[in-house]
Amino acid sequence: MAKFVAICACPMGLAHTFMAADSLKKAAEELGVEIKIETQGADGIKNELTKKDIKEADAVIHAIAITPQGIERFDDVDVYEISLKEAIREGKQVLQEIMEELNLK
C-alpha cells in the first residue's frame, strides 16, 4: 500500500488549510492508500509529521501558501508542492499522478 504524508497550510490557517486536508484524506480513502496530514492553521500545528513519518513515506506533499513551520524536516526528501486550490479541487488526481510517476500501487 502506498503511503503519503502531507502538510496543508495557508496564511490565515482557517478554511482552506482544512478543506485541502479533507480533500486529500478523502482521495486517499477512495484510492485505498495511507495518508497522514499535518495542518498548520490558526489553532497551531495539528497531527505533526515526525521524522519517522517522513522517512517511511513513499511521497511527501506540500499543499501550502506559506512556508510551514519546521520546513527543515524536509531538506533531504523530494517534495511534491501543490497549491491549496489543487489539493481542494483535484486531490484524487494529484495522488493518482504521483502514484503513476513513482509506480506505486
Image (spheres, rainbow, N blue to C red):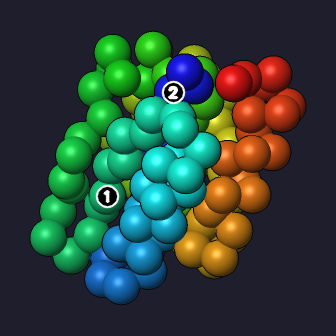
Tell me the residue that label 2 is attached to.
Answer: 3
Q: Is residue 38 above or below residue 59?
A: below
Residue at the farthest right position: 101
Residue 64 lies left or right of residue 37; in this view the side is right
Q: Name which residue lies at 47% across and 60% down.
A: 26
Q: Is residue 34 above or below residue 77?
A: below
Q: Which residue is nearer to you in this view: 23 or 65?
A: 23
Q: Are marks 1 and 2 in contact (CB under 8 Å)?
A: no
Residue 99 lies left or right of residue 28; in this view the side is right
Figure disc tally:
2
Q: Which residue is nearer to you in this view: 21 or 78?
A: 21
Q: Is residue 70 above or below residue 85?
A: above
Q: Which residue is nearer to you in this view: 51 or 99?
A: 99
Tell me the residue that label 1 is attached to.
Answer: 39
Residue 46 lies left or right of residue 7; in this view the side is left
Residue 58: % across, % down? 59, 22
